[in-house]
Image (cartoon, rainbow, N blue to C red):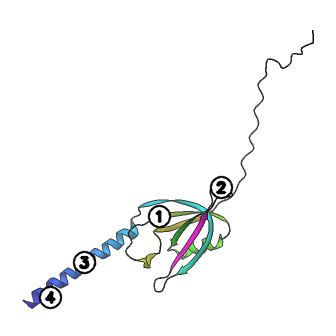
Amino acid sequence: MQSKILRSVLITFVVLLLLAGGWLWLTLNWSYSQGERAGYVQKLSKKGWVCKTWEGEIAMVTMPGAIPEKFEFTVRDDAVAQRINLLAGKRVVLDYAQHRFIPSSCFGETEYFIDQVREVLDNPAPAVPSAPLAPSAAQGQLSEPH
């Protein structure tokens, strides 16, 4: 009798462990959404007591004089974090994947994980040639006073 109880407790524990592992794998490998955010990197630091992750934020400015919106993110790849640090102070575009319902902050404090970073090169808009003015009926005709 006692061995049956011990066996059922052990089987229940193993099933719960497999379910938790499956949930963790699913949340880390399946993305809820993907996109890009552009702005200026304000901070990037490696944080955590046990699980060290790169945590950062960018200031997204929509137009000069507007209050910037902050976008907080997590970087899992050290090479991407190093590239972000090299582009500090420049306008960048961050490609992210959003992973929701991750059961622990050990994998990152945010749900936005950065995959790639690139610098925004501000190219001036090409000069647009002005269109010739349409001739008016009064052009080319001189009127003499009567």
Q: Nearer the viewer, residue 145 or 1?
A: 145
Q: Earlier in the sequence, mark 1 or mark 2?
A: 2
The quadrant the C terminus occupies is top right
Q: Earlier in the sequence, mark 1 or mark 3?
A: 3
**What whole-number distance in Å separates the C-alpha atoms at marks 3 and 4?**
15 Å
Q: Earlier in the sequence, mark 3 or mark 4?
A: 4
Q: Amino acid at mark 2?
A: Met
**Which of labels 4 and 2 is toward the front?**
2
x then y, percent, for residue 29: 39, 68
Give the SS element for disc 3: helix
**What stretch of residues is rendered in magenta?**
48-64
Which numbered circle lies on residue 6? 4
Q: Amino acid at mark 1?
A: Ala
Q: Amino acid at mark 3?
A: Leu
Which numbered circle lies on residue 97? 1
Give the SS element for disc 4: helix
- Relative to 136, 90 lies left or right: left
Q: Residue at x 62, y 56 (%)?
A: 62
x then y, percent, for residue 134: 76, 25
Q: Amino acid at mark 4?
A: Leu
**Which of labels 2 and 3 is toward the front?**
2
- Looking at the image, do the residues carrying marks 4 and 2 touch, with CB atoms under 8 Å apart? no
x then y, percent, for residue 15: 22, 77
